[in-house]
Image (cartoon, helix red, strand yellow):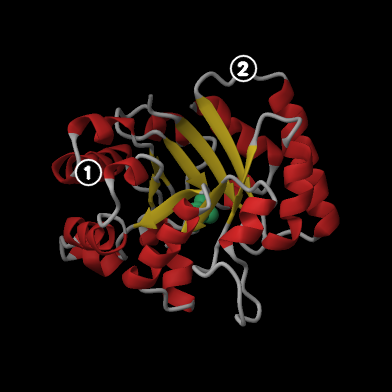
Amino acid sequence: MRKRIVAGNWKMNKNFLEAEELVAKVADALETRKLKNTVVVLCPPFPYLELATDIACEAKFSVGAQNVYPDDSGAFTGEVSPVMLESMEVEYCIIGHSERRKYFHESNEFLALKLNALLKHNIIPVFCCGEVLDERNAKKHFKVVEKQLTESVFHLKKDQMAQVVIAYEPVWAIGTGVNATPAQAQEMHAFIRGLIAKKYSKKLADEISILYGGSCNAKNAAELFSNPDVDGGLIGGASLKEDDFMGIIDSL
Ligand code: 13P
C-alpha cells in the first residue's frame, strides 16, 4: 500500500541544543497524533542523527540522512557511508537534492551509484528530481525529470524500485515562497507515476510514494496533498519550526 510521508529536510541548520529541542518537540507533538499509514521522517544534519535515532526508537517518527557516499568505506575524507547510516538505524536518505546537484556537481550517473549503495544497505532512498525555472519556461520540465529518472533510477530491478520514494522538487519553488500550484504538482506527479508504470508496471507505480517539495507550508499543504498523486511532502524551511511542521503533518 502506498505510504503517505512528510519528511523534514533540515538542510544545514540548527546547533546541537536547538536540534535536541526540535527533535524533542516533534516527538512530543506526535505522541498524541494518530498516524494511520502516514510516516514522519526527520532528516537532520549528520552530527545530529544519533540524537534523533535515540529518540525515534520510542517515538512516532523515522530518521533520514541528507546525503551518503556510494562506497562502504575507504579514503574519502569527510564523507559518510551507507554502512555507517545502516549501523545507526537511519532508515531513509535523501539523494539528488538540487542543492547537491548545483553546489557539489552531482551527476545523474553518480546518483545512480548512491541509490544502489543505499538499497544494498536497506536504507530507503528519497530520490529528488525537478527542473529549474528556465527549463519550465521552455516547457522542458517533463523531459528534464524523465532524464533524471532514466539515468539515475530506472536501471533498478522491480523489487528494488519498490523501495524507492520519489520527491518532485521544482528548483524554482525551493526556498522561494513560490510553491508549484496544486495542478502543476499533480500534473508532474501523474507524469512520474506514468513513467514508472511504463517502465515497470501499473501496480508498482501505484505503490510508490511521490512527495512534493518546494515552499510547502502549513497553509498550502492541504491543497497540495489533496491531489491523488501527491503522497506527502519533503519540507525544508517549514520543518525547522515544530508548529509549522506539525501543521503540515496535520494536513495530510
Ligand atoms: P523549502 O521547503 O524550504 O522550499 O525547501 C524544500 C526542499 O528543498 C526540501 O528538500
Q: Position of residue 219 (x, y in %)?
A: 51, 35
Image-quadrant location for residue 84: bottom right
Crowding near pointer 2: few (<14 within 10 Å), some, many (20+)? Answer: few
Q: Position of residue 23 (x, y in %)?
A: 75, 43
Kindly state the secondary structure of the residue where label 2 is placed: loop
What's the amino acid at mark 2? Lys
Kindly identify which residue carries mark 1.
196
In-image side of 123 versus 151 (left or right): right
What residue appears at the point 45 percent right and 30 percent down from the top-left corner?
Answer: 4
Is ligand 1 less than 8 Å from the beta carbon at label 2?
no
Q: Is residue 66 above or below residue 216?
A: below
What residue appears at the point 45 percent right and 58 percent down from the top-left corner?
Answer: 174
What residue appears at the point 38 percent right and 37 percent down from the top-left corner?
Answer: 209
Q: Position of residue 109 (x, y in %)?
A: 33, 71
Q: Which badge, 1 or 2, comes first in the chain's sequence?
A: 2
Q: Is residue 129 above or below residue 27?
A: below
- Checking the image for residue 211, the label placed there is none
Image-quadrant location for residue 241: top right
In-image side of 122 versus 108 (left or right): right
Count the labels in the image: 2
Q: CA distance from mark 1 to mark 2?
A: 31 Å
Q: Position of residue 195 (x, y in %)?
A: 18, 46
Can residue 214 be seen in this snapshot? no
Kindly identify which residue carries mark 2.
34
Q: Is residue 44 above or below residue 245?
A: below
What residue appears at the point 71 percent right and 18 percent down from the top-left corner?
Answer: 32
Residue 168 versus residue 51: which sits nearer the camera?
51
What's the amino acid at mark 1? Ile
Kindly state the secondary structure of the residue where label 1 is placed: helix
Which quarter of the figure is the N terminus placed in?
top left
Image-quadrant location for residue 115: bottom left
Can residue 212 be seen in this snapshot? yes
